[in-house]
Amino acid sequence: MLWHLLIEPAPGRVDGTGRQIAADAADLGLPGPWKVAASRGFLVEGSLSRDDLDRAAREVLADPVVEVFTIRPSHEAVNGAGTLVHVLPKPGVTDPEAESALALLRDIGFGVTGVRTIKSYRLEGPADALPRLISRVLANDAVEQAVVGTLPFEKLGQGRPYKFARVETPIRGLDDKALMVLSKQGQLYLSLDEMKTIQAHFEELGREPTDAELETVAQTWSEHCSHKTLRGRVEFEGEVIDNLLKNTIFKATTDLNLDWLVSVFADNAGVVRFDDEFDVCFKVETHNHPSAIDPYGGSNTGLGGVIRDALGTGLGSKPICNTDVFCVAPPDFPSSMLPTGVLHPKRVLKGVVAGVRDYGNRMGIPTVNGALVVDPGYLANPLVFCGTVGVIPRGMSTKSVLPGDRIVALGGRTGRDGIHGATFSSAELTGESESLSGGAVQIGNAITEKMVLDVILQARDAGLFRGITDCGAGGFSSAVGEMGAETGAVVDLENAPLKYEGLSYTEIWISEAQERMVLAVPPDKWPELKALCDRELVEATDLGEFVDTGRLTLRYHGQIVGDLSMHFLHEGRPKVVRKASFTPPPERPATLVDKDDYSSDLLTIMGLWDVASKEWIVRQYDHEVQGRTVLNPLVGVEDDGPGDASVILPVRGSTRGLAISCGINPRYGRLDPYAMAACVIDEAIRNCVAVGADPSRIAILDNFCWGNCERPETLGALVLAAQACHDIAIAYGTPFISGKDSLNNEYTHEGQSLAIPPTLLISAIGQVPDVRKCVTMDLKAEGNAILLVGSTRLELGGSHWMISQGKDEGRAPSVNPAEARAIFAKMHQAIGQGLIRSCHDLSEGGLAVGLAEMALAGGFGVDASLRDVPCDNDAAHDVALLFSETPSRFLIEVKPADVRAIVDLFGELPIGRIGEVTGSADARLVIRGLDGDSRIDAPVHSLKSAWQAPLRW
Amino acid sequence: MATPRALVLRAPGTNCNEETAAAWELAGAAVETRRLGEILEQPSTLDAYQILTFPGGFSYGDDLGAGRIFATRLGTTLKDALHRFHDRGGLLLGICNGFQILVKAGLLPGEGGVASLAHNASGRFESRWVKLLPTKGVTPFLTDDEPIELPVAHGEGNYVTANGTSGGNVVLKYVDAKNSPTEQYPANPNGSKHAIAGLCDATGRIFGLMPHPERHVSPFHHPRWTRDGAKPEGDGLRIFRNAVAAVR
């Protein structure tokens, strides 16, 4: 019997969900208004009677105070006004709450065989807009199905038994065209050159590949897994660069040769020494393509995946904080102009925030740093970056695999989730991507991963395994393939625990079901590991053995379904050779208009998305769980100012801290990719330095998100950015320790191509010798002096002032590495000596925005003058001084008595006393121009409202 | 005098157990963390402790409602052992998800009252610092009436009862800048009527609260320590010290 338990808010209780949906519909410009009554519920299958289910609802399924429920056979109509729409997960899609309900109901003695969650909406509004309401607000077709009216189900689909058949995919003898058809239709997304290499390999072996073999090669060779563009050969401006990554970013790290680096570009995350007892690791991943199709699921599993990276680093690190950066199109983008298959940016942003929130909060890992970048170029390709920092006892940062070790899968079960994720993320999106690749979207279950985390750290400390990695893109295929690369592996695929019946051996092998780790376990430790997992209710399965054959052998119930040479798999890929060129956009000098008053320009900039308050996002994340956070992302008198970096304590009881920050700016990237890379590295570092990190102990990560690099101009921009990474890393003495790229961020529809702007995210972890010396950016006391450190140049290209003027002129800011490095060192000294009351880095919006933010965070006024701003001659203009975005600059607040000491400390470096903190009553921001007259004069509360308005959702 | 023994109970999805254990330790208790499963198998384990803590997190994913599954498992197997523990003077503390568990298991508000913690009035999960006014002398956990500051981080913290009364001993209230109890957002982060942030049973020995005292044991946990200077210790530590003193 299949029952539908419908749970509604009790009479008199607010229907928050219904209200939110009506508001979302209005937001997206759907015809309306809609009256929405929302309810939740369960489809419950089993031998239980109506009375049983009534009791179950009272005892566990419905809330006794705020909810009421009704029970009916699933196909029986629900009476009432309006149209009833039900939304439920598609068969095979992970449904964690249903799993919990099933387990609990069974435990307390109910005869239940299956449970599915279901949401039901009673809707009243314009009938012709109903389909749009369903597809744009209520259900995501990639993972959910919507049913209008009576439910047609009489039982829950649970998959059909799988009948084994070994499948070969003929490749020998195919011509070029046929090879490319196979590559595309099989969703392998390999190039002709690569397909021919595979063909030759099997011709040599005298047999056809099995489907599993072909999939394994495609995943291992995918851009996502092998980074073949960045590691390939690039011909750029007459120069041949053999392995771009190795010759730029890696090279800088190698040449710096720092003794505090533990493991770089070798493991799932980069590892650095923290103190005598602990190392810390950091990894930032992208999850762009899945997030374009299902924002919630995409960011949710993006974060889940990078947490597993930290967990799978060395012998396992404990994740202590997360980061998230989103790039989306303007959330107020007109709905009517959306291309086919593209989700509205506001829906994307809400979805990705909710995804990170639900995974991070449930894992109990504070999300402490991030950024939001808004640009129309991200319309079809939103970017989602998620990062995790972990702490790991020293000596546990390396791992090994020995022949004879058991291959143990630990964590979630395997389903059809995310099949072809690795190859899909390496392909361009199209209008059909949603239907083609729905299966590539994964759904997360954070609690499963939390349980895995608890087990792994215990198993690590008990020495129960030798090697570990996470199942990410490519699933078992890439996890086992990588771990066994130097040895060999034999896998018995039928041993993998499945979510439901019907998976073929290939699906088991390549599924990207979440929350799974693979361990190399010495045979004598396996019983103890298994017992530990049983106690902690985590499923652990012996999948096979690492062997010394140098081959990857796949078996299904004893039959060989794959047998590949590890050497061919990992070394056989033909080197990608690409041409790159770069034509800088024509230079358009900035025209500087003289105005008497720039207050309204500043108010406009305060309300631009990238500058505006992100409090709506930040507050949805737990940033204090684990009790490690000593500087919050939100700071100031009302806990709502924009902190430059958060600081956490990796080791309880110690005062040594870790600052986490980032830098990103695609607007500079459009103008000058080299300058952009230099600027965002500088931004990430100066954010860290601003709160008190030691600039000689900052490590950084790169995440390149680019368009299709088969286009020479696109690749040329990438080459320049990579070269800047090398040069600046060397000049600053700041090593890269890990990175990840995501290329092919393009959307093609009806022959039109839309690429993202060149986007480089730099994430930084900086060590703070003593967190008690940390400073925040909010102004602290009336009468204190305000000084500007660093020189201002005429650099308005890509600036927020240009955006506010609707203009696109000027050159992108560039760094002066020698001066920047000297400034960072002095800043750190000044903070260490306790001379600085507040410190804020200057970024988007320049000096004017920096002062405004310090004022609104501290609740004080400012009286400043542009006359003493250190600057180049050509920047000696009010507009440039107010809004130029020259890097390596800081605003500092200093007690009057300490000004002398500060000025002496900075010596020859550019520093100017530009003003003072004024009172908090009727606080105003006043900035006087070069002629002494006021150029900006605005109440701080107006600046604050303009800054808070955009994301007050 | 023997060191009081505190037990921190964890289940799948519990995620504040480490810092909660650290807070007990700072407060002078001997603390152990155990799985709920162990206690379900052997309820008499509880006899070794004077303090039982249900820490924050998302036990069982908060599926079926925050704390519901944990509470159900307590109710079906551990009812008698918990009563025994309580009757012999043991203290029970539930923080955030732990408070939700105590309420959904019927241990709070007590005396047969039925309450729940509904979704925040704002409709979303929120992290923020709040100011709280304790009532002194009703529960051993709260021994003075000086306002304290603690962070909240929850989506379901709106305390409700069927009849709209508090149904129990309200001993911790959200207050505004003037230290007056408030139902106004954001000083009251979830819309709880009567500004209820925490309450105890008739004996005072079962205490539950939505805010997180374990996240404010160090002065450097406070969000404005760089403005106002660091106090000798975090406000939350007092709650743990009071409990340790009461059972010592």
Image (spheres, rainbow, N blue to C red):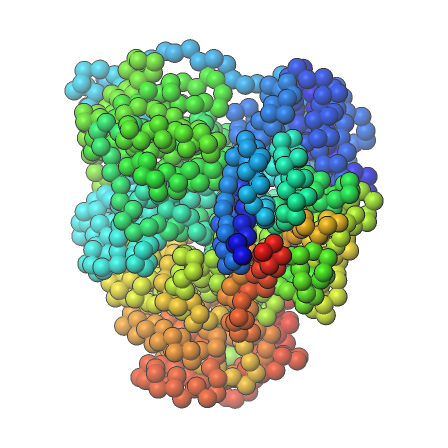
Say above or below: A841 vs B112.
below
Residue situated in front as seen by the camera: B34 or A205: B34
Residue B203 horizontal/vertical position (percent): 73, 50
**Place of residue A5 in the rendered image (x, y in percent of width and height, measured from the top left):** 71, 26
Q: Which residue occupies 30% across, 13% down?
A: A559
Name the foreground residue: B153 vs A926: B153
The quadrant the C terminus of chain B occupies is bottom right
| Along the viewing direction, whichever of A632 and A292 lies nearer the viewer | A632
- The structure residue drawn at horizontal position 43% and vertical position 86%, both measured from the top left corner, is A899
Q: Quadrant of residue A677?
A: bottom left
- The reply, left or right, for residue A47 in relation to residue A484 is right
Vertical side of A952 occupied by A939: above or below: below
> Looking at the picture, does residue A555 appear above or below residue B175?
above
Q: Quadrant of the N terminus of chain B?
A: bottom right
The percent coordinates of residue A39 (x first, y second) are 71, 34
| Residue drawn at point x = 33 percent, y = 50 percent | A393
Report the side of A824 relative to B40 (left or right): left
Would you say residue A106 is visible in this rendering?
A: yes
* Count of numbered circles on the image: 0
Is residue A706 at least partly visible in the picture? no
- Residue at the spot x=55%, y=52% of the render? B4
> Residue A116: which quarter of the image?
top right
| Image location of residue A563, percent across then percent down | 24, 21
